Each structure stands twice: as C-alpha cells, then as structure tokens.
Image: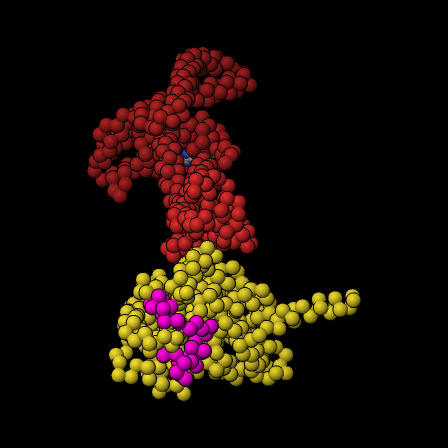
Chain colours: A red, B yellow
Amino acid sequence: MGHSPSVSGSLRNRLVLSLIGGAAILAVLLFFVVRNYAAQVAQQGQDNILRASVTSILDAAAIREGEVEVDIPYAAFSMLGTASDDRIFHAIYQDARFLSGYPYLPMAAGRGRESTFATVSHQGEAVRVVTASRVLIADGKRTNVRVALAQTQDALSGQLEQISKNAALLGAGFFVLAILLSFWATSATIGQLKRLTDAVTRRGPQDLSPFQKPVPSEMLPLVTSLNSLMGRLDQSLGQSEDFIAEAAHRVRTPLATVRSYAEATLQRLDKEENRQDMRSMMRAIDESSRAAVQLLDHAMITFRSDHLERQDIDLAQLVDELVVRLTPIAEMKDLTLHYESDGPVPYSGDPILIQNAVRNLLDNALKYAPIEGTVTIAVSATPQVVINVCDSGKGFPDGELETLTSRFKRGANAEGTIGSGLGLTIAMDVASAHGGVLKLSNQPEGGACAQLLF
Amino acid sequence: MRTTLVLIFLLLPVLALAQDWEDRRVFGNPEAETQLRIISSTDTSLFAPVIERYLGDNTDLSVEYLVTGTSDIYTIFRENPEAFDVVISSAMDLQIKIANDGFARPLSNVSHPEWAQWRSSLFAFTSEPAAIVINRAAFAGQAIPGTRQELIEALRARPEMFRGRVGTYDVRQSGLGYLFATQDARASETYWRLMEVMGALDVRLYCCSGDMIDDLSDGTIAVAYNVLGSYATARVDSRETLQIILPSDFPTTMMRTAMVSRAAPHPERADAFVRHLIALQSSADGGVLPLPPIDAQVNDPDGATIVLEPALMTFLDALTRKKFLAEWEDAVIQK
Ligand SMILES: Nc1ncnc2c1ncn2[C@@H]1O[C@H](COP(=O)(O)OP(=O)(O)OP(=O)(O)O)[C@@H](O)[C@H]1O
Ligand SMILES: [Mg+2]
C-alpha cells in the first residue's frame, strides 16, 4: 500500500531556483548597465565643462606684434571648480613650442578645432585631459595654438560612488521584488498541480470517472493520460467483475446439480465409510456454492457501489422485513431474534445493498452464536443512522478484529462452519459506498457486535 | 680636489638653504629634539603669540620661524619641500598653486568651513582687507577719500602734493601685491585709471606692506594703495599719524592660508600645529592672534573676499601674467 515513488528533485525548488538565478543575473546586469550609463553621463558632464573651458581659453588667444598672446579668462578656470576641489592643469603650445602651463601634461591626440578627450596619468593621478587647437593668422603666416586642459576626477569618482551605491540599491530592490514574484509565480503554478492532486486524492476508491474540470494546457497531456489510464482500469475492473459474476453464476448451477446427485447417492449408500466420503464431498460442494453465491453478491455490490443510486427508504422497515424473513431459520436453531426500533428511520441509500449487508451480519450471528442464544437487532436514527446486530456468542476471535473484514479472511472460530470469508467484506463495502463504516466489537458480557454506521 | 668636491656636495643643501631671510627666529627650547620649520610671509611679531601658545602645550618642541616674501616662499618651498613643515602665506593664488601641484599634505577631519579650505590641505585662517592708508597730515583740511574714485580725484586735485609721495606694491616682486592687483583689475576698470594716475605721480613701488607703513609713518609718502590694513592696525605707535580706509566700493579681502608640506619632516607635529592655528582663529579668545579671523566675514555681502578656488591660478599662467604685467607697467611706469 505505502509504496511511495522515488523523488528526484522538486519542481517548486527548480522553478524558484531558476527564477531567482535569472533575477540575480538580471539584477547584476541592471547594476552594471545603470552604473555604466550614469558613469558615461557623468563623464560627459565633466567633458562638457572642460570643452567649454578650453574653448574660452582658445578664444582668448591672439597674435600681437608677431607673438602669441593668451589672456586666460578667469571664468575658464572658475567653471572647473568642483565640490571635491579637483586639481587642474593646463599647457599652451604654439605649434610644437611650449609656451606656458605644465610642460609635462600629456595631450590627447587629435587635430583641428575639434576637442579630443583622454584619461591619462599626470603627477601620479588620473586626470581627464581635453586638447583643442586653433589656427591664428597674422602677416600671412599661420600659427597653430594648442591648449591642453586637465582636471582630476575626485568629484567624478565621488559621484560614481554615489551612483554605484544607488545602482546597487536598485539592483538589490529589483532582486528582492523578483524573489517575491518568483515565489508567487511558483506557488501559483504549483497550485494547479496541487489542485489536480487534491482532486485525485478526494476521489472515492471506486471513482474512476474521467476528470472534467478545466486544467492549464500544459497539464492537459497529463490529465488526458490519467483519464485514459483510469478508463482502461475501469474497463478491466468491470471486465473482471463481470467475469467473476459470470463464472460464479456458471459454477453455481452445475454445483446445485452435483449436490442433488450427491444427496441422492448418499441415500443409496450403505457402507459407513462411503457415506462419510459422500458427506465430505457434499460439504465441499456446499463450500463451493457458498463461495459462488458470495462472489456473485460481492461482484453485484461492487458494481452497484460504482453507480450508487440512492433512494429514500425506511431502514426500520427494511431490517424488519429481513428479520421476519430469517426468523424461521433462527427458530430452527433455537435462536431468538430480538428486533428493536423506535419508529421509522428514513435514509437515502441503495436498499438492495443495505439489505445484503444486514443479511450477511444476521447470517453471521446465526452461524456463530450458540444455540438458544439471542440476537439483538437495533435500528436507530439518533444520534446517527445505525444498524446494530449483536449476538450472545463467544464474540469475534481475539486479535483478529482488524483483519476479519479482509477478503476471504475467516476467523479461527470458523472451523466447521461453511463460509467464504466475504460476508464482512460485503458489509464493509456497502457501508463505505454510502459514506459510512462497519464497526466490529465484542461486548464486555460476551457476544459479537457488528455496527453499520451511516 | 676630491674632498672639496665631496664637501661641496655635502654642503649643497645647506648652501641652498643659506637664504637671506627677512627674519628668522627660533621659539621654545633650542635644545629640543624636534624642530618645526615654518616658512611664512607673516611678520614675526604678529605670529609669535600663536607659536608661543602652541609651545606652551608642547614643551618638547622648538619652532623655527622663517619670514620672507610671498613670491620667495613659492620658489624656496617648491625647491625644497622636505625642508619645511608648515607654509604660511598671504598670496592665496601661489598657495593654491602649491597645493594644486601636490606639495601640500591633506589633513583629515578638520572642522573648517568649506569655503575657507581647499582640498582639505589649504586652510584660511585670517580675513584681511586691502586698504588705502593715508598720512593724516597730508589730508589736513581736505576730504578723506572713501573710494578709489575719490582717491583718484584727490590725487588729481593736488598733484604737487602727491608727486613722488604715493606708494603701492611692486606687483612684479610681491606675490600679494600681484594678487591684489589682478583681483582689483577683475573687479573694476577703476583700478587701471588709479594706476595711471599714480604712475603719473611717480609712484613708489614696495615689496611689502611693512615698508609702506614705515614710509607712511615718517611722512615719506602720503598715500599707500592696497596696503594690508591689518598691519597698519597692529602698529600701535603710528595710530595717530595714519588713517586706514577700506574702500567702500569694493574692499578686496585676502585670506591668509596655511598648509602642511607633503614632504614635511615632522608631519604629525605640523598637522597638529595647523589644527592649533585653525582652532585658535575660530576660538573666542581671538586676542591671541592679532589678525582678523575668518569668522568676521562669514557673511560677505559684497563678495569682496577673494574666493579660494583654482581660478586663482589664472593669472599665474606665464602668458597671462606677461600680458597683465605689460599692461601694469604701461600704466604705472611712465617714461
Ligand atoms: N457473530 C460472530 N461471532 C463470532 N465470530 C464471527 C461472527 N461474525 C463473523 N465472525 C468471524 O468472522 C469471520 C469472517 O466473517 P465473514 O462473514 O466475512 O465470513 P464467513 O461468515 O466465514 O463466510 P461467509 O462469506 O459465508 O459469510 C468468520 O469466519 C468468523 O470467524
Ligand atoms: Mg459470514
């Protein structure tokens, strides 16, 4: 029964992990993209100021009396002021000749008025340097004035640090959100599976009808195979039930014939040992036909349980009729059938099934209770619909209470009595088909009690 | 031959340091193991109280205080940054350039207003306006000029009175003079007209405020332009004779700055000294420092205080300086 299939991983974990992993990769990507972009923008800001500054210096260059004159505007350096007090360096060249500023300041390559930018190292610090030049013409001679202007990047790196911090926060926030979303998405997805599982679990043991409720398209193949599996199961179960019923039926009639022949033969036998043999033979025939009857009943019960048709009945009346019917048999055994009921007990169920169950219980009471005993049959509606069959015999054999309802299981006290071990199974199946239970117990003052609780 | 070479080689640094100082004084215990070297443009008399107060708490220390002009400080210090611990100068532009070129050592966690420091390595600790100082005798019975324009008019009105008796900084020599001149020129064209008028009156050119005040006191000159008012105020003896005028059009104001040399022989001591200086100027007992502290002008509505920013280096560029000096000479030195 408890054979659980081996587990290989968890769909939920796999889903959560892949979603979280994806989110982590995305978060890291987001961090770098945002930071890179912001760094570019920040660098652009510095470059723009450097360009404006270098342009204003170049604009202040002029040639007077054949000499290059540069009157650096105060604003050119002033606009380079930053919160971090960045250092600034400049160099002015006329053609290849150094004029003023810092002679070792590296220049960015490039020609023409277009400003070119580069990040270089100067005085052991990384600086952003812009280089631009301008052609001055005096007395028909062309002179190229070239200006390099550099600024350290303290303010920029401060800004970058702030940006990185914010980008990291953004990434982390995104990640946390993604985790929450992935948990939600996972449980929503797994929820569908769980719902199907619940639907399977909730089914009665006999319910093999196909699933009709809509399922997500991805689960459709699973449900379809499940349905077809159950269909085949139902069919083969039905076939085997049919087969058993058919077989029992086919065996019963010839058995009856054989028994009548055996009885007739017994009359004619004189030798005691031959008679003995013949009796054993008759007994075996009885066993077989009892088994056939019970098997037939059991098959009938299984079939009716599958397609249970409830109708309103009065249990009191139903049991009363049974008791009346069995009274002659009881009297033959000197047994008293004591029937108790307090008025009608309305119930909605299959009367044939219930009759069958109660008849089996009564049958047991008659079979296993001693001669001259009393069998008490009680039907009541409160607090629960219940049918009680108690006898005054020795009770169910000790230690076997749990197992007696199994198929073909007979107790230790069953020796010598004819039976197949299906009676209690039938009673239990009928009870559970109606959503009830069969309860077996021994009375403290002796005697077995079987209860059908609906 | 060889030994003399070695000797010269050994003595070279000493020779290089064998400088003509305007003043040189050793404070505290001369036997002390550590000697803090301060190179400064501030007169010893004005700065002595600060050093003495510091030595009061640090008895294991002596301080060598070396005074020279602002331009000299710039050259001397840059040549031998490892010979000095602290650099103090009134030429904000030169100081900024020293710091910009990486000769200053940043101090961490100094509580000082943002505008009064640069790169946590250059710290302003005084606020001193450039003044017009006059000898009262020369203006007896005359209106006292309150602005540059009024000064121009006063000079023009009595050229015979002022010929050869006006003085100002020789901006070619004095770093502070150059700073004042360039900032004045930035602020207004009046500066150039004033220089032309003074030039026409055979202006006398000075290296330093002290000399100008000396000549004012004994009547050699009658008017000095762009003198440090704080120096004149500090001269108790000449209070009667001199009058200090802060031009009401725009009183160009300089902040004296201090920094620790990056190559300082005693960086921790130098650090502590600069902190002491900053603490002293902002403390209630400002009496110790005979110079006006920066707090006096926290709210500077005129914007007359020279901003401690790298733009100060503009006029230090060789080409720009050359052009400025040419213009200045045109105006001042008239042949
Ligand atoms: N009233 C009872 N008193 C004592 N033992 C009982 C009683 N009812 C049932 N049993 C025990 O429970 C066993 C199972 O009963 P069950 O009705 O299923 O089978 P059976 O009576 O042996 O065969 P049959 O299929 O013909 O009824 C019996 O063999 C017997 O040992
Ligand atoms: Mg039975």
Q: Does the magenta stretch include residue B79?
A: no
> Measured along the vertical axis of the image, is residue A71 above or below residue A220?
below
Q: Quadrant of residue A322?
A: top left
Give coordinates of residue A248: x percent, y percent: 42, 17
Q: Does the magenta stretch include residue B218?
A: yes
Please name whichever residue, A436 or B177, is drawn nearer the observer in this view of the structure.
B177
Residue at figure coordinates x 62%, y 81% from the top left: B32
> Measured along the vertical axis of the image, is residue A236 above or below residue A55?
above
Magenta region: which residues? Answer: B194-223
Give the tally of numbered discs. 0
Q: In which quarter of the image is residue B321?
A: bottom left
Residue B14 located left or right of residue A46: right
Residue A287 visible in image: yes
Residue found at the far left of this picture: A343
Please name whichever residue, B101 or A298, is drawn nearer the observer in this view of the structure.
B101
Give coordinates of residue A406: x percent, y percent: 45, 31
Quadrant for the C terminus of chain A in the image: top left
Residue at figure coordinates x 47%, y 72% from the top left: B207
Residue at figure coordinates x 42%, y 63% from the top left: B329
